[in-house]
Image (cartoon, grey):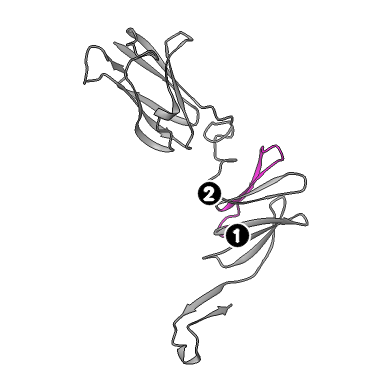
Amino acid sequence: MIVLLCKILISADFYVEPKIFSPKESLGKKDKAQISGNMEQTLPVNVNIYRQNHQDIIRTIPYTEFNYNYGDITNRSEWDGKDNLGNFVPDGFYEFKFITFIEHKWSKGNFHRDFRGMFISPYDVAIRPDGRIYVLDSERIQVFDSNRNYLFSIQPEWTEPGYLGYATSISIYQNKLYVMVCGYYGNKIKIFDTNGNFIKEFGDMVIFFSNLGLRELGMDSFLLLM
């Protein structure tokens, strides 16, 4: 009989079932331990299995045999009760430890336990002369120092004039950020200082019409500037 204990990778929530199983005695029924659980980011994970209170790894499940995609997933991997040599381990208590080789602070994203410094959908990047990095990421700009340490985010609310919905590109000129916004919220350039304070915007919406009864003028389409 094997009893399993689970040590959690901080950025994830795993569980192993069944907690007790007998791989040698009950072939085909409770003869494997199934690893499931939630991961908040796609992150390669190796699983090391130890006998309780022992330091030697008796089995490693490599990330190539582990479904490490983000989300709540059942049966990310399995353990058949065998060691790295293919032999069944003796009865006892065993611990699972989930580790990653990515050199990053992973505790629900970072030491703040949120998603600061993690990217959702990065579109563009601009770098200030002193090396400060501005990443246009979805509806925000994430700011890092020259050593890639997270500093702060620029993320106005949708009700504010600096809102970055549908932002597509960013550049820096004379210590100001110029962000291009396209789509539902208009085609505009929004300007911020490098500390994230909104200054102003310019430009407006361009609406495209096609085949609106203008063939008598020899036109299939035209642009209306507003």
In the displayed structure, would residue 129 be above or below residue 17?
below
For disc 2, the marked residue is 121
Cβ atoms under marks 1 and 2 closer than 8 Å: no
In the displayed structure, would residue 216 be above or below residue 145?
below
Q: Residue at x 55, y 58 (%)?
A: 165
For disc 1, the marked residue is 160
Q: Residue at x 46, y 88 (%)?
A: 215
Q: How far across and how far down the image is residue 57, in percent?
A: 45, 13
- In this orientation, which residue lies closer to the viewer: 154 or 49? 49
Q: Count all numbered tags in the image, as a single digit.
A: 2
Q: Quadrant of the C terminus?
A: bottom right
CA neighbours of label 2 inside 10 A, class few (<14), some (14 to 19), many (20+) = few
Secondary structure at badge 1 equals loop
Q: How far across and how far down the image is residue 162, in percent?
A: 63, 59
- In this orientation, which residue lies closer to the viewer: 108 or 171? 171
Type of amino acid at the residue the image marks with label 1: Glu
Q: Residue at x 62, y 61 (%)?
A: 180
In the displayed structure, would residue 149 be above or below residue 215?
above
Asked if residue 203 lies left or right of residue 32, the reply is right
Q: How far across and how far down the image is residue 183, in percent?
A: 53, 65
Q: How far across and how far down the image is residue 13, in percent?
A: 43, 30
Q: Residue at x 38, y 36 (%)?
A: 72
Type of amino acid at the residue the image marks with label 2: Ser
